[in-house]
Image (spheres, rainbow, N blue to C red):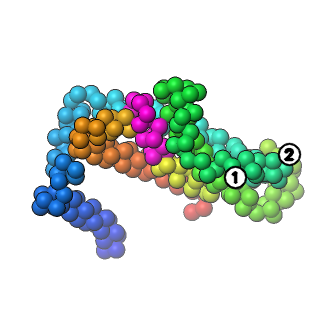
Amino acid sequence: MRARATATLLPLVGLAAFFALWEAVPRLGLVNPAFLPPPSVLPEAFLRELRSGQWLAAVAGSLGHYLAGLALGVGLGIAAGTLTGMSRTAEGLTAWIVRVLRPVPGLAWVPFAIIWFGVSPEAALFIVAIGVFWIVYFAAHGAIRGVDRDLIELAAAFGFRSGPERLVTVVWPAAMPGILVGVRTAIGQAWMAVVAAEIFGVAGLGQRMMQASTLLATDIVVVYMLTMALLYGVFDAGFTAFQRWMLRWRA
């Protein structure tokens, strides 16, 4: 019981110390408050944004880009990783394509996103999906490759001889822990991609942060930074619960 209480309190103590230090730095004049606003001014800034309707509009816009881009990137990543993980031929055919495209950062695709889709939600969705795809692809590919071959042979012995049957009954369940780790990583990466996708004019949290920064409204910038942190925390906690449910057979 004591260990559990300590494990619960320590993060809260650390967070309180962090906010106390943050409050002290601008208050003591170590940093200009215009460049680093203290936490105590953030509730008022948040209420201004909330009353104006801009906070809700920005959150709604970013959630649309985030969820659609995440779903597309995860779906394509799992599909491609499964294909190359199960087929040496597919892996060989795509090996150099992967080597060429993987190092290209998501921001490098912004010009093409604008050319192909214009300054639109579809462009933001594309950037988010690109940022998510490679994480999930490599997680799925590695997890599929790591499945014990004996399990596949055992499934064949019990009559699951076709590829789709083995995939659904053996390969995916065995690879699921590794795939889910990649998806959880992608949940965080997708928020980073959202900001990159919105700074060129698509409505959302990133665009609102850029607008506030041009006016040196750093309190507004921090409000949106914390908003993204909160949203990520909610999605990560929800996915962690889903992950435990999916892998309940390991308990």
User: Sequence-wise, which precedes: disc 2 or disc 1?
Assistant: 1
Relative placement, left or right, of 207 versus 45 is: right
Residue 17: image quadrant is: bottom left
Q: Main secondary structure of the magenta part?
A: helix
217 in relation to 145, above or below: above
Residue at the left extreme of this rendering: 28
What element does badge 1 sit on? helix
Taking the spot 52% from the left edge, 40% from the top edge, the residue there is 128
Q: CA distance from mark 2 to mark 1?
A: 31 Å
Task: Give the quadrant of residue 149.
Answer: bottom right
Amino acid tagged 2: Ser
What amino acid does circle 1 point to?
Answer: Arg
Residue 176 in view (yes/no): no
Q: How many marks?
A: 2
| Residue located 61% across and 52% down the image | 103
- In front of the other: 200 or 140: 200
Residue topped by disc 1? 99
Q: Is residue 117 left or right of residue 139?
A: left
Residue 207 spot, x, y in % from top left: 37, 34
Residue topped by disc 2: 162
Residue 76 position by quadrant: top right
Q: Nearer the viewer, mark 2 or mark 1?
A: 1
Q: Which residues are magenta?
A: 190-204
